[in-house]
Amino acid sequence: MFGLDASMLVFVVLAGLSAGLVAYAFLFKRMESESNTERRLSTVRQTEMDRSLVKASRDRTAEVAKRRKSVQDTLKELDDKQKAKDRNIKKPPLKVQIKQAGMLVTIERFYVYSVVCGIVTTLLVYIAGAPLILLPGALLAGTVGLPRWFVAFRRSRRVKQFLEEFPNALDIIVRAVKSGLPLNDGIRLIASESPEPVRGEFRRIVEAQQLGIAIPDAALRMTETMPCPEAGFFGIVIQIQSQAGGNLSEALGNLSRVLRDRKKMKAKVQALSMEAKASAAIIGALPIIVAFLVYLSSPNYIMPLFTTNTGNLILGISGIWMSIGIFVMRKMMNFEV
């Protein structure tokens, strides 16, 4: 009986083991197939994720390249416009020079004033007892030279006054933008509170905006009435910021710092060239001083230069050579910053 029970137990164990092996044999392929499927799904997910990362990186690269190209196109366009305007800045027509000098006279009235100035200059030279041969030169100098020199002097002085106050105006605009005000409100603030000529230039921007012209375009036109590179820098910064975006307050703050550094550099160059200017002034004045001293000591010795035709010719040639020398020294001492 015991032997029969042991045989039955062994038979049951062997039958269960056989059934398990058969079930494992049937399920192995399915389990292996599910494992391979899971691995393939994991591989597909990783591939999709890598593809998404590559696509995102490619999109970012394309966006950066597109923005860089947009900035380059904008800079090229602005550079072309600036080159076209440089001719009006360096050698503008007389009408533009009068406008840049802040003078309110028309070109016709300026010509009338020039003729009157020429006549008055000629009369003064004649009354002073100069030879008649010098009267045409005096008329030409009084009609053409003196009025244009006066316009150039007013123009240069107005540019210097503008550069003295322009960085402060930019700082005010930067503070206004940082406090949350729009750009046009900052420009209106400068147009009403700053001293001339900065106030007048920004008032033109406000008036152009009221006529429908965008602020960047109006800022680019500032060089038409203010012939200096700093005004062009301001227009370029506003134009680039409007097209490419970015932090306007930071851009204007950097521009203000650059303008102050340019001003310091100009002052440093002027200080370093003062010795050369003093030497040039002494060399230029030396012939006149010597001639005056000779006249005081021996007037009969030097008077033939003023009373004879040969002496007048010598004085004219000497004056021309002196003028050439002064012009060359002036070119050697003036540096563009």
Image (cartoon, rainbow, N blue to C red):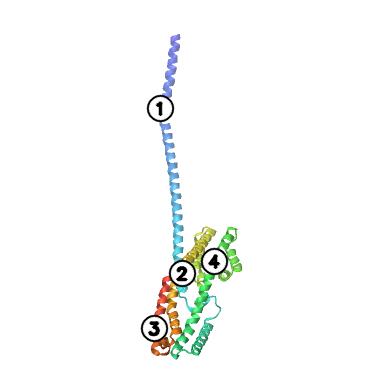
Q: Which residue is mark 2?
A: 274
Q: Which residue is mark 1?
A: 25
Badge 3 or badge 4: first in the primary sequence = 4
User: Residue at position x 47%, y 74% from top?
Assistant: 88
Q: To which quarter of the image does residue 68 belong?
A: bottom left
Badge 2 or badge 3: first in the primary sequence = 2
Q: Which residue is mark 3?
A: 317
Distance between mark 4 and mark 2 Cα atoms = 26 Å
Distance between mark 3 and mark 4 Cα atoms = 46 Å
- Which is more foreground, mark 1 or mark 4? 4
Q: Which residue is mark 4?
A: 166
At label 3, which amino acid type do we have? Ile
- Which is more foreground, mark 1 or mark 3? 3
Badge 1 or badge 2: first in the primary sequence = 1
Crowd tier of the residue under label 1, counting other residues whose Cα lies within 10 Å: few below 14, some 14–19, many 20 or above: few
Badge 1 or badge 3: first in the primary sequence = 1
CB under 8 Å between callouts 1 and 3? Answer: no
Tag 4 secondary structure: helix
Badge 1 or badge 4: first in the primary sequence = 1
Distance between mark 1 and mark 4 Cα atoms = 90 Å
At label 2, which amino acid type do we have? Met
CB under 8 Å between callouts 1 and 4? Answer: no
Distance between mark 2 and mark 3 Cα atoms = 29 Å
| Picture coordinates of residue 33, whole percent (x, y) | 41, 34
Mark seen at residue 161: none
